[in-house]
Amino acid sequence: MMHFEYHVEGGNFTKAGAASSQLKKILKQLNVDPKIIKRIVVALYEAEVNIVAHAFEGDIFIDIDTEKIGIKLVDQGPGIADIELAMQKGYSTASPSVREMGFGAGMGLPNIKNNSDELKITSQVNIGTTVELVTYLNQ
Amino acid sequence: MKVAEIAEKLNLKVFSGKEGLNNEVTNGYTSDLLSDVMGHADAGNAWITLQTHKNVMAIASLKDLSAVILVKGFEPEEDMAAQSNEEGIPVLGTSEEAFTISGKLYGMLQK
Ligand SMILES: Nc1ncnc2c1ncn2[C@@H]1O[C@H](COP(=O)(O)OP(=O)(O)OP(=O)(O)O)[C@@H](O)[C@H]1O
Ligand SMILES: [Mg+2]
């Protein structure tokens, strides 16, 4: 059983992806199936960038055991009023400057869904959002 | 086909990441939307784009892409070039548009 934590600063795009990059290295060292690593990296990156793009700050908690990898992202931010709407491909509230960088296609949450075995999102408007992902290792 | 051979045949400028010129290019992916590339590009792809910031390299590295090709004369920002050097993923450049350079690369990789 291994546990890792990372802090994510909202608005700081120069560090976006740092946690995903760290986790990728760890999973490689643990000899996790490359196909599974690819999926986890996509899902975590998108969830990490969503904190950077949409929230004030957040923390990532990662638990790895022999059966599964659990990732929980807890942020303080505006929250998501309608999660079903936010999950739709193409829906985005990203600012013009964020869009100019190529973010804001509204494909991040769909990517997370496609690349995780279990996904749970809970959110409170003006408080924050929690994203929980599970990926099973032996499938 | 190696990145170096593509750079030479398509007359691409090599901005950074020279250590990765031996990377094998499996195919190409053309897009300026980062989450599109995150979701759909495959390992070994050369990524054709006009985005010139550091997050491009973060994605290229996470997705194990072989190279980034900047179109229309765009040049990498300083921190993008620095990360390209660190990761050994070359950033190349062309004055041509995405359509043209994608077509040329496609033709080369089909042979
Ligand atoms: N952590 C979050 N806090 C607040 N709002 C969020 C958060 N994550 C997602 N959202 C909302 O859900 C929308 C859709 O998210 P999604 O990741 O699919 O697209 P995006 O981030 O706008 O663009 P892309 O991910 O394609 O760059 C966002 O535009 C935002 O309104
Ligand atoms: Mg997103």
Image (cartoon, grey):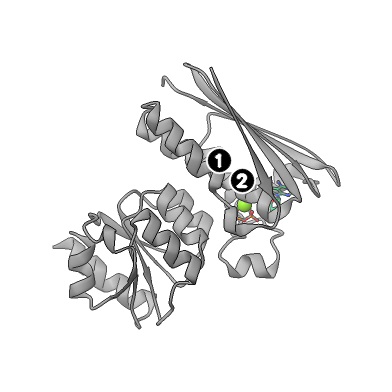
Which of the pair B65/A136 is nearer the observer? B65
Does the Cβ of the disc 1 residue fall within 8 Å of ligand 2? no
Q: Residue furthest right?
A: A126
The residue beneath circle 2 is A48
A35 in relation to B5, above or below: above
Q: Can residue B36 be seen at all in this image of the molecule?
A: yes
Q: Label 2 neighbourhood size at 10 Å, few (<14), some (14-19), many (20+)?
A: many
Q: Amino acid at mark 2?
A: Glu
Disc 1 is placed on an element classified as: helix
Q: Residue at x 53, y 29 (%)?
A: A117
Disc 2 is placed on an element classified as: helix
Indicate the quadrant where residue A38 lies: top left
**Chain letter belonging to callout 1:** A
**Left or right, A76 with reference to A114:** right
The residue beneath circle 1 is A44
Q: Marks 2/1: CA distance?
A: 6 Å
Percent across and percent down for residue A111 are: 54, 45
B84 in relation to A28, above or below: below
Q: Residue at x 50, y 65 (%)?
A: B79
Q: Label 1 neighbourhood size at 10 Å, few (<14), some (14-19), many (20+)?
A: many
Percent across and percent down for residue A18 are: 54, 47
Q: Residue at x 53, y 54 (%)?
A: B35
Q: Residue at x 51, y 18 (%)?
A: A65
